Amino acid sequence: MSNYNPKSLKAEEFISDAEILETLKYAEENKNNIELIDALLEKARPKKTEQGVTCAGLTHREASVLLACEIPEKIKEMYALAAEIKQAFYGNRIVMFAPLYLSNYCVNGCTYCPYHYQNKNICRKKLTQEEVKAEVIALQDMGHKRLAIEAGEDPVNNPIEYILECIKTIYSIHHKNGDIRRVNVNIAATTVENYRKLKDAGIGTYILFQETYHKESYEKLHPTGPKHNYAYHTEAMDRAMEGGIDDVGLGVLFGLELYKYEFAGLLMHAEHLEAVHGVGPHTISVPRLKKADDIDPTKFDNGISDEIFEKIIALIRIAVPYTGMIISTRESEAVRGRALNLGISQISGASRTSVGGYTEEERPHDSEQFDVSDQRTLDEVVRWLMELDHIPSFCTACYREGRTGDRFMQLCKTGQILNCCHPNALMTLTEYLIDYASEETKKVGFALIERELAKIPKEKVRQIATDNIEQIKASNRRDFRF
């Protein structure tokens, strides 16, 4: 008997093991049910209305049927639908960001992460505020405007006060034309009071990966430390929202547990946030287990192929059409390139996963959290995106204009967000090209901007964007936004 209740605040009720097992059984029984599969694809298709675009999405059970389906022509239809949905909600924009590792001190015993406290090989490091400043200037000199800060869980070395001080330092640094305009935070589950402090510090999205939704596996993978507590970790997003944080980001570490189980659990978590708070996840990340210091991913026997990984990305986009989807430099250029057409809307560029890595000329490996597959510079990634006809966007306007939480979702779910995001992307791309890009990238970029300006449907918006872009080119004026 399933105790499943998406409106419950208890982890084992909104992520019900019995419900997931029933879902997987149902999916297996219906994986060749063409009539049902066609109906689900039709249900998920974007529909134009007077207000804009609407998209029904799919439940965890419906999406699990599509994941179980192995019929090649149906998978092809899924991929085409994922691309259509991504285009309807996000256009061809790809938001750029970089992770910033503050400290790798950690008291947890996670068996898949080199930061676990028993690892004596890794060089332990915590940035001082002067070092934070140097890292931020190095990131600003590349052209980054949006960071995701990361730190291990250690109440002595990385208390909330340290994280808040780092956020204050990051926002205070104005270097040449560089500013970090949005700081997202990826730190361990904490209290409502601490989430309130993070909100007051002006963070963007609070990100926390579940790692695995399978409770028994979760407890084995986290044998010691505060992270061992499955319920406290899984219920963190509810506490974050109670603390006033509008935008939260979910994710699992694919490769720790069976992917079909994780997929259902992830969608159930998104449904739970919608049911309780009226706002689903602002982002969903799709990290895969990778090699790192003293971690061998082949020891985990649930690794997934590129084909399965890409199918998961497409189906998350179909099931949760409004969410931002993030892929990191864990993945290769080839995988990231294919994923962009299946629903990804945010990628990192020129990432370093070591503490203090951006100020080093050579990529340091002694404090890395995981191997970086895509090691290109930000300029190379930006040019690559534009050559694939994507718009690299450094925009942070929604967050600073108060378009967060339910206000963002209301605009996004009707496709209205395009009226702000498309011109904002072009204006922030212009800033990047003028201030940081190589000559080759500038040439590709300005041609793209000219083509894309012509696509802005409202003449008034198009004219304002065009005028602003001319001002960016002619002066040091920056940060125009709709």
Image (spheres, rainbow, N blue to C red):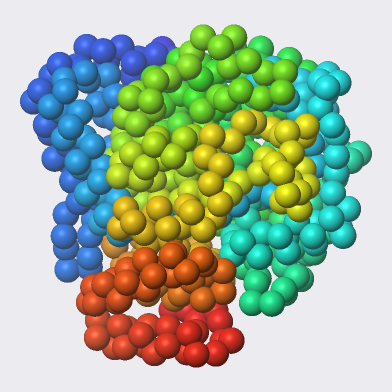
Q: Quadrant of the N terminus?
A: top left
Which percent across, then down, holds residue 200? Answer: 72, 63
Which percent across, then down, holds residue 339? Answer: 36, 40
Total number of numbered labels? 0
- Observer-nearest residue: 225 or 239? 225
Furthest-left residue in this view: 35
Query: For the point 30% across and 58% down, which residue is it?
Result: 389
Which percent across, then down, holds residue 465? Answer: 37, 83
Q: Quadrant of the C terminus?
A: bottom left
In the picture, measured across the screen, residue 227 lies left or right of residue 298, that is right
Query: For the point 76% across and 49% down, which residue is it?
Result: 360
Query: For the point 56% across and 82% down, which residue is it?
Result: 478
Q: Is residue 465 above or below residue 359?
A: below
Q: Is residue 262 above or below residue 159?
A: above
In the picture, measured across the screen, residue 407 lies left or right of residue 138, that is left
Q: Is residue 249 above or below residue 88?
A: above
- Residue 277 in view of the camera: no
In the picture, measured across the screen, residue 96 lies left or right of residue 238, that is left
Q: Is residue 365 above or below residue 213?
A: below
- Observer-nearest residue: 218 or 277? 218
Query: For the point 15% across and 16% down, which residue is it?
Result: 32
- Residue 313 in view of the camera: yes
Furthest-front residue in this view: 439
In the picture, measured across the screen, residue 72 lies left or right of residue 370, that is left
